[in-house]
Image (cartoon, rainbow, N blue to C red):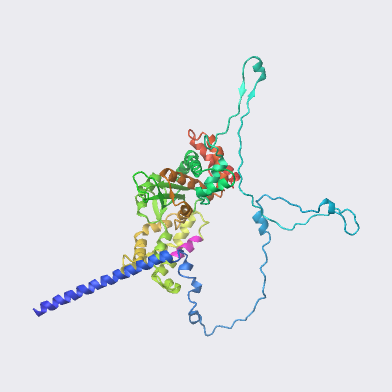
């Protein structure tokens, strides 16, 4: 009886100890979550290693003397250089103002005082000297252009009672039955989508310069121009993008009102697709696409029949897309380790932690790859195999040794598991020199959209969201190809309405951002 009671007590003790251990793990996990939430709310958002781990040259400032001491180190000869003033950079101002129109303003003596004060003889001009340069700001202005059409008749035919009249073909307007001009629509679009100025503020701007245009009219200009002229061009860019060897993809939430069958607070998504980072054909493409959800089927439809390599972050929705390979992003993997650095650590302790060591190893991959940017894809792949492959496999092996000692739900456990579970996708850059180590080219494209989103918060309708996607596609593609969006959009709205592209869509190739004429006229 006594032995049985002792066994029951021991079992109870063992159960309590196990429960305590589990509770300790849960408390630790909750503390880690709390620290992570505080870090997200109040901490530094940067992922730069010098900010997260500190500069390697500054990690040991406190005990630097103890670490670096050498008993037999020679005493240096102290040579204090003379103080030197920084010389002003010559030609900087001329370079800055070179492309701007210049006007010369000569300050001279009035005719009635051009008399010598000594002898009274009239003064003779002897030259001029430059005193200063100023930049003058000219506020926006609008003017009205009234279009008339000339008519011509043949007087000889008229004498014979035959009327022969000829009239020139009128250029088509950017918007039928509207006072909008190509430049005015281009201005509204660039203000909203390049400089993130919402329409209610543009309404005030138009009123201040003399034309009271309600924001509803401005919105109508934007949506009609996008639907009539920009969406067909985006469709053409889409077909060209599917021919590229690498496509990057990413997505970000956007709130859209008045979606049928959905609440206004329901998340919609803007999907972004770009060409590869190492593309050398001069065709930079950025395409935005609005969808009412985050299902991978949306990306699957966009990338239907794509035969190249798709590069994304680790979102599972992309796994259902059929492609030659699915490359993953090392910046995304590194972000998990950045987030797993325990709160409150000094930069020195963070650098020596498991998370810090992982970050430094990943940074080494990027440092080695940075020097290969100018090589051909074949040479880049060969150098990656020589320089990075062994280090990469050693990194994975090191993580395998760490994995058993980490809690799966902890931030470090998630970082280790994510990296090891996605080894194949993270290795793809070794198989093809066209693949980048990161999805940064797409994240940069999506960042421009998120900055604008802060100013307008939501789209008023799915129709408006689709128009915004088309406009962002054109504006960001334009910028990626080194063009000025206002000049390019004005050019488009002057020419596309007069092109028979519905019957001959190949005619749109003449106005794509990388063509020679566009590059010449829209810088």
On whether residue 226 falls in the magenta region, the answer is no
Dividing the image into 4 quarters, which one contains the N terminus? bottom left
Q: Is residue 429 above or below residue 146?
A: below
Quarter holding residue 119: bottom right
117 vs 481, left or right, is right
Image position, residue 164 (x, y; %): 62, 20
Magenta-tinted stretch:
362-370
Of the pair 453 and 285, the residue shown nearer to us: 453
Quarter holding residue 22: bottom left
466 vs 81, left or right, is left
Q: Main secondary structure of the magenta part?
A: helix
> What residue do we see at 46% from left, 58% from top?
382
Quarter holding residue 128: bottom right
Q: In the image as oriented, which residue stretches furthest toward the bottom?
A: 71
301 vs 61, left or right, is left
Image position, residue 169 (x, y; %): 58, 30
Do we see residue 91 in this rendering? yes
Q: Is residue 496 above or below residue 358?
A: above
323 vs 59, left or right, is left
> What residue do we see at 50% from left, 74% from top?
58
């Amino acid at each position: 009886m006594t032995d049985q009671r002792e066994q029951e007590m021991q079992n109870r003790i063992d159960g309590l100890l196990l429960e305590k251990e589990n509770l300790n793990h849960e408390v630790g996990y909750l503390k880690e979550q709390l620290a992570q939430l505080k870090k997200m709310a109040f901490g530094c958002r940067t992922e730069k290693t010098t900010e997260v781990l500190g500069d390697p040259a500054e990690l040991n400032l406190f005990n630097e003397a103890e670490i670096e001491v050498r008993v037999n180190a020679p005493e240096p000869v102290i040579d204090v250089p003379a103080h030197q003033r920084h010389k002003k950079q010559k030609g900087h101002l001329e370079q800055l103002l070179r492309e701007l129109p210049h006007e010369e303003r000569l300050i001279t003596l009035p005719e009635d005082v051009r008399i010598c004060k000594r002898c009274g003889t009239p003064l003779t001009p002897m030259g001029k000297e430059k005193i200063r340069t100023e930049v003058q700001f000219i506020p926006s202005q609008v003017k009205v252009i009234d279009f008339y059409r000339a008519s011509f008749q043949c007087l000889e035919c008229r004498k014979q009672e035959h009327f022969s009249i000829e009239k020139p073909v009128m250029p088509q307007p950017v918007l039928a039955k509207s006072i909008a001009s190509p430049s005015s629509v281009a201005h509204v679009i660039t203000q909203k989508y390049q400089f993130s100025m919402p329409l209610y503020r543009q309404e005030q701007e138009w009123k201040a310069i003399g034309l009271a245009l309600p924001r509803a009219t401005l919105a109508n200009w934007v949506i009609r121009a996008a639907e009539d002229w920009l969406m067909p061009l985006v469709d053409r860019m889409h077909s060209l993008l599917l021919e590229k060897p690498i496509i990057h993809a990413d997505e970000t939430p956007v709130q859209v009102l008045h979606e049928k069958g959905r609440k206004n607070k329901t998340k919609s998504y803007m999907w972004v697709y770009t060409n590869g980072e190492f593309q050398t054909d001069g065709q930079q493409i950025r395409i935005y696409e609005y969808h009412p959800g985050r299902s991978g089927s949306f990306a699957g439809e966009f990338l239907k029949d794509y035969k190249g390599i798709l590069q994304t972050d680790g979102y599972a929705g992309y796994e259902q897309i059929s492609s030659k390979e699915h490359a993953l992003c090392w910046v995304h993997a590194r972000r998990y380790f950045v987030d797993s650095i325990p709160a409150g650590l000094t930069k020195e302790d963070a650098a020596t932690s498991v998370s810090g060591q992982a970050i430094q190893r990943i940074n080494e991959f990027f440092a080695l790859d940075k020097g290969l940017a100018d090589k051909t894809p074949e040479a880049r792949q060969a150098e990656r195999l020589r320089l990075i492959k062994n280090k990469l496999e050693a990194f994975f092996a090191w993580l395998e040794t760490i994995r058993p000692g980490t809690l799966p739900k902890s931030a470090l456990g998630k970082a280790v598991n994510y990296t090891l579970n996605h080894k194949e996708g993270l290795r793809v850059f070794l198989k093809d020199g066209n693949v980048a180590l990161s999805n940064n080219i797409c994240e940069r494209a999506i960042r421009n959209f998120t900055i604008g989103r802060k100013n307008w918060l939501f789209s008023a309708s799915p129709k408006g969201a689709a128009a915004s996607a088309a406009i962002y596609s054109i504006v960001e593609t334009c910028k990626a190809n080194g063009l000025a969006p206002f000049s390019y959009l004005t050019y488009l709205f002057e020419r596309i309405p007069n092109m028979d592209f519905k019957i001959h869509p190949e005619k749109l190739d003449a106005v794509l951002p990388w063509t020679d004429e566009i590059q010449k006229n829209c810088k």
